[in-house]
């Protein structure tokens, strides 16, 4: 029956996995993409001249129920007051320029420790931390855990537990996350 919810945990797990895989192959909603691009431009204007940098913009929902998620980071520490100021200025611009049709919710935050690293600035900020990195090596995908010893605009260097040093270009990295010590 359409819309029926799976009964047991295993069925719910597989239903969730299938829905996530299916979502990867859905075409990008052009309206959401247009909004995300405009929000990205306005965010860049707001943070210009600061040490903040834009990590990601996501737009979800439909007219009247949109959620605009903006992730901003800094190579130095960011506090709640910093985020609140950026959020206030960005929200003002979004409203003045009437970027989002109908009501919306603006969520501005730093990426947090659980989100994957996406930009060279984020890697530089986390030099000295332990990372779990998934990367493509010629024909296969590998996962390593190591201490991030260096990061520049082209690549990173990890020191593996074996004391071997591994250099990876950003193009080879498919996902990198901070490995929590617990």
Image (cartoon, rainbow, N blue to C red):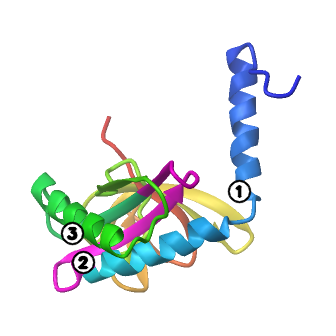
Quadrant containing the C terminus in the rendered view: top left
Most distant residue in the right direction: 1
Q: In this view, does 179 lie above or below 28?
A: above
The secondary element bearing badge 3 is classed as helix
Locate residue 125: give its quadrant.
Answer: bottom left
Q: Is residue 19 above or below residue 121?
A: above
Locate residue 135: give its quadrant.
Answer: bottom right
Residue 34 image point, x, y percent: 56, 74
Residue labelled with disc 3: 89
Residue range in magenta is: 46-68
Residue labelled with disc 1: 24
Q: Which of marks 3 and 1 is nearer the N terminus?
A: 1
The secondary element bearing badge 2 is classed as helix
Marks 3 and 1, how far apart at CA: 33 Å
Residue at the spot 41% in from the left edge and 72% down from the top edge: 39
Residue at the spot 66% in from the left edge and 71% down from the top edge: 30
Disc 1 crowd rating (10 Å Cα; few below 14, some 14-19, many 20+) is few
The secondary element bearing badge 1 is classed as helix
Q: Earlier in the sequence, mark 1 or mark 2?
A: 1
Q: Which of marks 3 and 2 is nearer the N terminus?
A: 2
Is 31 positioned to the left or the right of 37 in the image? right
Q: Residue 172 carries which label?
A: none
Mark 3 or mark 1, whichever is nearer to me = 3
Is 79 positioned to the left or the right of 63 in the image? left
Marks 3 and 2, how far apart at CA: 7 Å
Marks 1 and 2, how far apart at CA: 31 Å
Q: Which mark is residue 46?
A: 2
Q: Is residue 80 magenta?
A: no
């Amino acid at each position: 029956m359409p819309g029926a919810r799976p009964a047991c945990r295993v069925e719910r797990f597989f239903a969730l996995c299938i829905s996530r895989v299916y979502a990867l192959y859905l075409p990008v909603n052009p309206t959401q993409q247009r909004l995300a691009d405009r929000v990205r431009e306005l965010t860049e204007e707001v943070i210009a001249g600061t040490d903040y940098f834009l990590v990601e913009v996501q737009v979800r929902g439909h007219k009247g129920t949109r959620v605009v998620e903006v992730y901003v980071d800094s190579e130095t520490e960011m506090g709640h007051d910093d985020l609140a100021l950026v959020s206030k200025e960005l929200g003002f611009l979004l409203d003045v320029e009437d970027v989002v049709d109908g009501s919306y919710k603006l969520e501005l935050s730093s990426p947090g420790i659980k989100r994957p690293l996406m930009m060279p600035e984020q890697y530089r900020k986390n030099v000295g931390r332990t990372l779990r990195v998934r990367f493509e090596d010629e024909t296969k995908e590998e996962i390593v855990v190591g201490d991030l010893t260096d990061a520049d605009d082209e690549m990173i260097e990890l020191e593996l537990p074996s004391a071997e040093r591994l250099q990876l270009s950003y193009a080879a990295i498919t996902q990198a996350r901070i490995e929590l010590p617990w």
